[in-house]
Amino acid sequence: QVQLQESGPGLVKPSGTLSLTCAVSGGSISSNIWWSWVRQPLGKGLEWIGEISHSGNTNYNPSLKSRVTITVDRSKNQFSLKLRSVTAADTAVYYCARGFLPARALDYWGQGALVTVSS
Amino acid sequence: QSALTQPASVSGSPGQSITISCTGTSSDVGSYNLVSWYQQHPGKAPKLMIYEGSKRPSGVSNRFSGSKSGNTASLTISGLQAEDEADYYCCSYAGFSTWIFGGGTKLTVL
């Protein structure tokens, strides 16, 4: 059974960088899979942030592309999200998820990590 | 990119059927058979219910079905049960290796 677990600081200062890691267990991050990040402001809908393939190819939401970097660490079986120049509008629950091919629908999700942007 | 359009809320009584629509454009829903649907209970992570428009993952009840016509995808839940009360989100491939979610629909079981 694949499990995903987000970790990282729950509080980030405005203009700082949000950093989260998603640890994958029960499966290899090097599988033919896309690994995604999705966020959800409290009380609002889901927003796709971006994804990374097992080989390191990345795709990003155009509205966030200039501030986002997603990387993969195969040695630790995990992938990471960095979002730069954050504002209060970036306060949200951040989910990592697995997208299986070819549909890239998200079949396994982490429990979510609340990140608050505040001074 | 604008979010796909879903009704803010739908409701139904136990045993009834309901349908949630997800309207996009010819650049996303209308061009690809890559619509997925997610169920989200309060405080929980989303759960995949339908992928590629109409396919159900293993373990998902056959009371859930998906379809598409033109630029609009739909999720139908038959034999409504109390446990179906949740938020539902559609998601579609939007071209250029990007994905877009709908605004979400709150389902109330009366």
Image (tube, coloured by chain):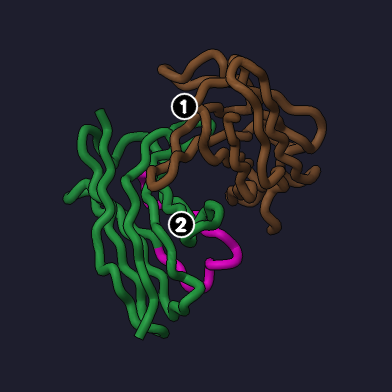
Chain colours: A green, B brown
Question: In the rendered structure, which amino acid carries the disc numbered 2?
Answer: Arg
| Quarter of the image where one finds residue B55 | top right
Q: Magenta segment, which residues?
A: A54-69
Name the foreground residue: B37 vs B53.
Answer: B37
Q: CA distance from mark 2 to mark 1?
A: 24 Å
Considering only vertical position in the picture, is A98 above or below A74? above
Residue holding disc 1: B83
Report the side of A9 relative to B43 (left or right): left
Residue B50 in the image: state x and y as whole percent.
55, 27
x 44%, y 35%: residue: B47
Magenta-span inclusion, residue A29: no
Circle 1 packing at 10 Å, graded few (<14), some (14-19), many (20+), is few
Residue A77 in the image: state x and y as whole percent.
22, 46
Question: In the rendered structure, which amino acid carries the disc numbered 1?
Answer: Glu
> Disc 2 sits on a residue from what chain?
A
Name the foreground residue: A8 vs A119.
Answer: A119
x 79%, y 37%: residue: B71
> Disc 1 sits on a residue from what chain?
B
x 33%, y 77%: residue: A12
Numbered circle sitting on residue A102: none
Magenta-span inclusion, residue A68: yes
Report the side of B3 relative to B44 (left or right): right
